[in-house]
Image (spheres, rainbow, N blue to C red):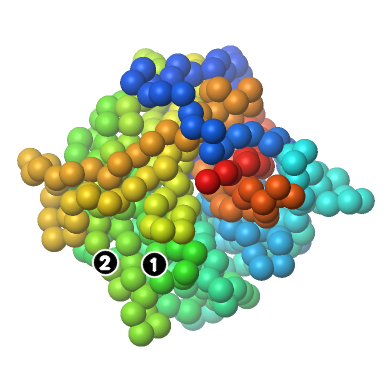
Amino acid sequence: MRFRRGAAGALLALALTAGSCLPCLHAAQAAPAPGLSLLGSLIVPFGARVDGFRVGGLSAIARAADGTYLAVVDNDGDTPARVFRLAFAVTEAGVSPLPGKTALQVPVAAILLAGFDGKRLDGKNFDGEGLALEPSGEMLISSETEPSIREISRLGRTLRSLPVPELFLAGTTRGIRGNLGFESVALSPGGDALWTANERALQQDGPADMTGPSPVRLLRYDRRGGEWVPGPQFVYEVGPIDRPGSGFQVRGLSDLVALPGGDLLALEREFVLGHGFSVQIYRVSVAGATDVAGREALAGTTYTLVRKTLLFDFARSGLVPDNLEGMTFGPRLADGSLTLVLVSDNNFSPLQKTQIVALRFRE
């Protein structure tokens, strides 16, 4: 989700100008498990450009087969909707430009996105948020305003749209709330399941309050005969605001990564005016959770939530996070452990950072 220009943007600028403090921790949470640890981070300088397009607003990231990364841009006014190809190294020492390159040269190419008719998409009709790569190299990209998920060729042309259950579609009294739609897309390691979720509760599922817990639906698509078919839905509860303030504040489910065996990693991100950003990563198990796919509304009904376990809290890492929104697996390290790579959406603001962060992930 982009913190939109206007009132929210002004509040964000005020908060960042005033400085951010480390947020409080959830009182009921135990110390993070040793599965995730910080390796390091890299800042792509504000003003970086590639192929004539300014780099920023990176809302999701996925690692390609050649070791580069693709990052989709959140909507940027009426400029072309686009995906940037990034090239950087992830090692035990953290994140760095490739040998002989600088941080300004991390973005190496821009892929412009187009509809079925070949006409370019732009920030007014496409709000890129989630991104996953199929083994073929085709991209699965969500736009949160409708919401939608499109299958897009390597060259950027829309090939097909996935069917979206009607209860998610934006409406006056039901469906997603504004700017809180499909923020995430995650493909299972075997390529037979695709996950997405609304960022905060649908209108018919929970209150509009931004400070308390919010039930969101994890929607799984199953691949059948080469097509993606909507499958079960499970309820994930976004936690309450860590440290409530008196001004603009929001917390939501920002991204998902699918693990072997069916579990997920979930990225929760919040912003509170005066306190800055707070970011946590949870491990999620849907085992034993209620499938609510047949329910038009969650409000007033009973169900079993998915189980979530805190794995990593940036407040304990020594790194102050920016607006981290995207997450993907990176390369394996020499000791065999995986890496997890995250990217931030700087809202094209000089007061924020395009931040690339690497974590070590040990099962």
Cα distance between the residues tagged 1 and 2: 9 Å
The residue located at (74%, 50%) in the rendering is 334
The residue located at (59%, 30%) in the rendering is 321
Crowdedness near tag 2: few (<14), some (14–19) or many (≥20) residues, C-alpha within 10 Å? some
Q: Secondary structure at mark 1?
A: strand
Q: Is residue 316 above or below residue 102?
A: above
Residue located farthest toward the right when viewing the structure as drawn: 100
Sequence-first disc among 1 and 2: 1
Q: Is residue 285 above or below residue 115?
A: above
Is residue 129 shown left or right of residue 155? left
Is residue 356 shown left or right of residue 101? left
Q: Secondary structure at mark 2?
A: strand
Q: Mark 1 highlights which residue?
A: 193
| Residue type, mark 1 in image | Ala
User: Is residue 214 at all visible to an observer of this figure?
Assistant: yes
| Residue type, mark 2 in image | Gly
Is residue 303 shown left or right of residue 62? left
Query: Do the numbered discs 1 and 2 sit on residues whose CB atoms are within 8 Å?
Result: yes
Q: Mark 2 highlights which residue?
A: 231
